Amino acid sequence: MTETGNPPAAEDKASAPVIPFVSGARPAGEGGHFEEFCAHPAYFLMRAYRECGELAEFDMGGINTVLMVGPQAHEAVFRADDINVSAREAYQFMVPIFGKGIQYGAPIDIERQQLRMHSRGLASERMNHYAPVIAKETREWIANWGDSGEMDFYEGFADLTIKTSTHCLLGSEFRYSLTEEFASLYHTLGAAADAGGLQDPNAQKSAYHARDLARARLEELITERVTLRRAGGEVHPDLLQIYMDATYADGKHLSTSEIAGMIVWFMFAGHHTSANTAAWVLVELARNPELANEVVAEIDATMAASADGFDMKTLRRMALTEGFIRETLRVHPPLNTLTRRVVEDFHYKGHIIPRGKNVMLCPYVAHRLEEQFPHAEQFDPHRPNPDNPFALIPFGGGQRKCVGNAFAMLQVKVIFAILLSEYEFELAGPPGTYAEIMPSLILRPSDPCILRYRKRR
């Protein structure tokens, strides 16, 4: 474990080594590195690491931030007391999205109780229920594809994973009354989770106004469903039911506003990972046809030997398929700015990061360290996990590891078990045209992400 120790004395602060500052900043008051960061956060952070090394300081438009790279640095941040190195303070721009009283908008003890509510919906028996639901949605998605065609698969997977998440979270009755409005509202919320929120969570801009309207409308839709269930005395095996039945330690039930916030929180945790990762998995399958053949062979053999359909036992036997997904998450991690606000001076290896600054971890940079991932630029689904558990961090780590990671992996695995059983895929353009872009804080394939599909013979 990396020790962070006690707060240093004043004379220790004066003698602490200076953290290197990234070049290219605009003058104070003109944004520092903010414009370059916003253009592509992952690429900027890679430049910062290559220039400065393990620790690199930069100016996020008035909030100085220290990028920390490597398993020891990751562990130091993930193991730090959340009160002293605070995700809540850094992510206040998420409070209007999730709602007051939910995660970053709740006291830590309440947030931890809410996390336990989420975890009840991710127990193995629940996941066994979700797997066939995802399979059903995927079969319905491909039912009218025909023998061959082309599609923007980023948009396609975004639509599919909204449906699968909604079906699993809110039940079939909500899913099949789903309109385009629901997906559009969720997209509006996602668009408001931008880099500007790290700089100024209280900014007045059109995206944030649209966010507030969308959040209010989502709460209306979810409240309608809760009211109907309660009126009819219905009980369903989904997350909505868990939230409706759950109580805090004092015996108080969640309000309908809190239920809506819990749903938005969970969908944020799983949906972006599922949709983006599914799109990248398909691109990498098409880029690497020999590896794709291995994955297809494993899926064919596993499904032929299974009499139980899509249960967790069957899915666990798809080791190479899971390895392909994990390698995709290594190379193309969706979330690349894991940020904390330093509330009390934080020190690491003799360096002192004073209160008021941010610290940031970047999976995109971390997953390209040759000492942890030999031949890091090579896509290798057979790659073993690194020895240090803090080297591979697509879902973060510590007590704030992404709550939706198991559900996201389940979605992608089931989706590809269906797709690759029925179709084969190839790129519609040169491999290099499928670029990594970050129009928000999420890494995604370039728009559009067109691939060809053809029915297997």
Image (spheres, rainbow, N blue to C red):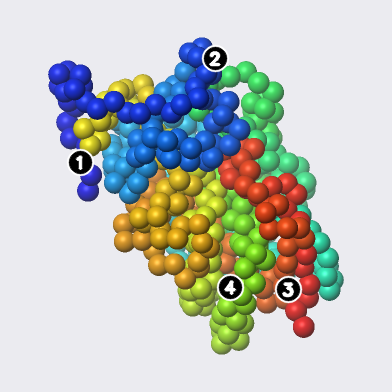
Q: Secondary structure at mark 2?
A: loop
Question: Which one is earlier in the sequence, the residue at label 2 or at label 4?
Answer: 2
Residue under label 4? 291
Crowding at dot 3, Cα within 10 Å, few <14 / some 14-19 / many 20+, comes out as some
Residue under label 3? 423
The residue depicted at 51 percent of the width and 73 percent of the height is 320
Residue under label 2? 30
Amino acid type at image mark 2: Glu
* Residue 238 x, y percent position in the rendering: 56, 58
Q: Are marks 2 and 4 in contact (CB under 8 Å)?
A: no
* Residue 243 x, y percent position in the rendering: 51, 48
Residue under label 1? 3
Amino acid type at image mark 3: Tyr
The residue depicted at 49 percent of the width and 47 percent of the height is 364
Question: Which one is earlier in the sequence, the residue at label 2 or at label 1?
Answer: 1
Question: Which one is earlier in the sequence, the residue at label 4 or at label 3?
Answer: 4
**Is 215 rendered above or below residue 431?**
above
